[in-house]
Image: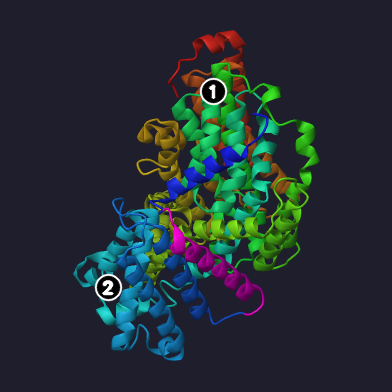
Amino acid sequence: MAEYTEKQNEKEQEAAEEAVGNARELRGVTYYAFIIIAVAGALFHLFVLNFYPLEPWIFRSIHLAIGATLGLMLFKGSKKSGDRVSIVDWVLIAAIIGVTIYIAVNLSSLLFRAGVMPERWDVIMATAGMIVVLEITRRTSGWTLPILAGIFVLYAFAGPYLPGLLYHNGYGFERFITYIFGVDGVFGVTLDVSSKYILLFILFGAFLQMSGVGKYFIDFSFSLAGGMRGGPAKVSVISSGLMGMMNGTSAGNAVATGSLTIPLMRRVGYPARFAAATEATASAGGQIMIPIMGAGAFIMAEITGIAYADIIIAATIPALLYFLSVYFMVDFQALKKGMRGLPRKELPPLNNVFKKAYLFIPIVLLITSLLMGFSVIRSGTVAILACLVVSWMHPGHQMGLKRTVDAIVLGMRNTIQLLAVCATAGIIVGVIALTGVGMRFSSMLLGIADANQFLALLFAMFIAILLGMGMPTTAAYAVAASVVAPGLINIGIEPLLAHMFVFYFAVMSAITPPVALAAYAAAGVAGTDPFKTGFTAFRLGIAAYIVPFMFMYSPQLLMMGDGLGIAAAAATASVGIYLLAAAVQGWFFKRPAGPVIRILLLSAAVMLINANILIDAGALVFIGAAVLLQRQQPAQTMEDRAAASEPGSL
């Protein structure tokens, strides 16, 4: 593969669009109207964010109106609908525009009476707005999140009839609907993050793609790792991490990047299921990859009040541990199957790739700006402008007016889904706040922790994964942060630790059976069984279920403490990750590992979770025993491994 061609780039984009939903093929006046609204909406956001702040509720309502208008124009109400925007769509568009105007005109009154003493038109407008929010979420993300929101809405009215923990006094429809469609619900923290950060960084991702920087990431990954054993799988790990951190959706990234990497993984010998699972696992990991972390870090910063720069610094070691684990997993698989990499002649020439290292400037500039203390908005805006400048240094990718408009439209298209899920997640967050169920859950968690803190953490993990199943990462974390994180904080865990713990498991819901969205999306590309792919992805990403416990018991992994302690914790955790991968894959010291050795390796890996010298010494004993037993087995040659490999196995 000498070049990641424009044809492949188009294929990637088509696959991404297919993953997002049932998009229309807009034509004629509607097509140009969509472009005008998208460009005007993007420029409006950049202007307000950088130069002319608006009252938050007004800004968020305009943000929702722009996204809903674009979503209703672009996405069909059903698969049977044609490509023409229907009367129903135009009615819904008119409704959300009317709601936005109503909020702007009556803002000062709404701030006092919404959710307390609402008037008739407040209720009508809030109801219309809720219908539009749920509809655009259904069209862009399917039924899962709207149904979950509906369950929470029913809970708000059913509370007086429920026992124990779930009981509350209940609310009248007028008070409920105006509260939820207000600054504590739909227009709360999740839509605030969408309007300020998610849109900005999805635009940044679109500019990276149009300027050729996204293409360079793939070329760089292939040049760096394509020739290694099982090279395309390692390319998938690197490239999906780079691209996934910017697009905010692991399932969409699994299809987009996987349309290239999965066929190449199969070509060098990986079974279809393993190839799809690798792509899904790497794409899910992109949501925890610094510095953008799939937009989840922005929500964390808003909820906790912790500086964004502090969050990405804290997230560095855990993210690297995760990708190190996935790398070991695919490397051991390549060793077991006797795989080789792609021929050097089919890879981008190293000298050409390094000559274009200037294409990393936008990313370097973004990270540097953030670490120097500039605001996230200013840093993101500068990074977008850097893409424009860099494109003119990159022959064939110069961003003139047309490419710039294309980048803006692409960014706004990609924003629609996340905007919708953030708005619907706001419904759930609002119900949790209104009913007080989050605090009662915290009390329950506190009771469990009195008996055993590990059990409390285990329970919190299951709840975070369960709440996140079937949802995009951003919504999954927003909901879990409202329900689970306060409980962890109440049992004495620091806010950063608690939210990072919840965030990891919300992200990993995308590869956790039975509803593993990222794995199912990648399975569609590979043409393999989705359910079995989900279990393989779970196995490959097993480190993500261990790493949060690692930093809970060793806060040094979140850069807490002195430099020596941080380095020691990172080193022992890395060894633990290696042993975990060896145990899961059944491969150690150039030989297959039997059950006893795998148990020893797994035990040592678990012991290395806690940064304690005595426990680490015990882990060394297990490692030594595993090494001694393993050395008694004969090493396998490349030919032996190739002969032993069975097509279609994991």
Q: Residue furthest front?
A: 28
- What are the residue bounds of the magenta stretch? 25-52
Tell me the SS state at disc 2.
loop
Q: Is residue 56 above or below residue 151?
A: below
Mark 2 touches mark 1? (CB < 8 Å):
no
The amino acid type, in three-letter code, at marker 2 is His
**Is residue 440 among the parts visible in the rendering?**
no
Taken as a whole, is the magenta stretch helix, strand or loop?
A: helix
Image quadrant of residue 119? bottom left
**Residue bearing the label numbered 2:** 168
**Is residue 102 among the parts visible in the rendering?**
yes
- Towards the viewer: 76 or 177: 76
The amino acid type, in three-letter code, at marker 1 is Arg
x and y percentages locating residue 394 in the rendered image: 75, 47
Image quadrant of residue 90? bottom left
Q: Residue at x 50, y 30 (%)?
A: 275
Is 35 magenta? The answer is yes
- Towards the viewer: 291 or 23: 23
**Residue bearing the label numbered 1:** 267
Q: How is the image coloured?
A: rainbow
Q: Is residue 508 above or below residue 76?
A: above
Q: Residue at x 58, y 69 (%)?
A: 305
Rendered image: mark on residue 85: none
The residue carrying pointer 1 sits among few (fewer than 14), some (14 to 19) or many (20 or more) residues within 10 Å by Cα, namely some
Q: Is residue 170 above or below residue 194?
A: below
